[in-house]
Amino acid sequence: MNDIGDFILEVLKGVVILLIWGWILYLLGYVVLWAFTLGRYPKGPKTQRQNNLVSGVGLLFLIVLWFGLAGYNNFVQPS
C-alpha cells in the first residue's frame, strides 16, 4: 500500500510542477518577454530550451516583483 501512495504522490507532484512551470510561469514569462522586446521574442516554433527560458524569465520576474513589493512595503511609513 505504501508503494501505491508514493506513486500517487509522485504523479501529483509532477502535475503540480508541470502546471506551475509549464503553464503559469511560461505565460508570465511570455508576456514579460513580449513586452520588453516589443513583440519580437518569442517567435517561431517552440523548443524545450525556449520553453525553459521563457518559464525562467517568468520566475525571475515573479521574484523581482515580490522583492520589490516587500521592499516598498518595508520602507513606506504609514500615515
Image (cartoon, grey):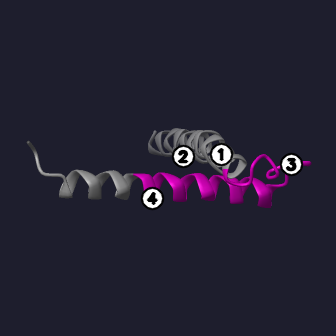
Q: Which mark is residue 26?
A: 1
The residue tagged 2 is: 10
Q: Residues within 10 Å of mark 1 (few under 14, many from 20)?
A: many
Looking at the rendered image, the quarter that the C terminus falls into is top left
Mark 1 and mark 3 in contact (Cβ < 8 Å)?
Answer: no
Kind of residue sitting beneath label 3: Lys
| Comes first in the chain, label 4 or label 3 | 3
Left or right for 48, reference 19: right
First reached walking from the N terminus: tag 4 or tag 1:
1
Looking at the rendered structure, the kind of residue marked 4 is: Val
* Alpha carbon distance from label 2 to label 3: 34 Å
Check disc 2 and report its element: helix, strand or loop. Answer: helix
Query: Which residue was labeled with disc 4?
Result: 64
Q: Residue at x 59, y 46 (%)?
A: 25
Give the spatial CA distance, label 3 vs label 1: 14 Å
Image mark for residue 43? 3
What residue appears at the point 28 percent right and 58 percent down from the top-left corner?
Answer: 71
Distance CA(mark 1)–CA(mark 2) = 22 Å
In percent of width and height, residue 78 lies at 10, 45
Judged by depth in the image, the label closer to the viewer, 4 or 2, is 4
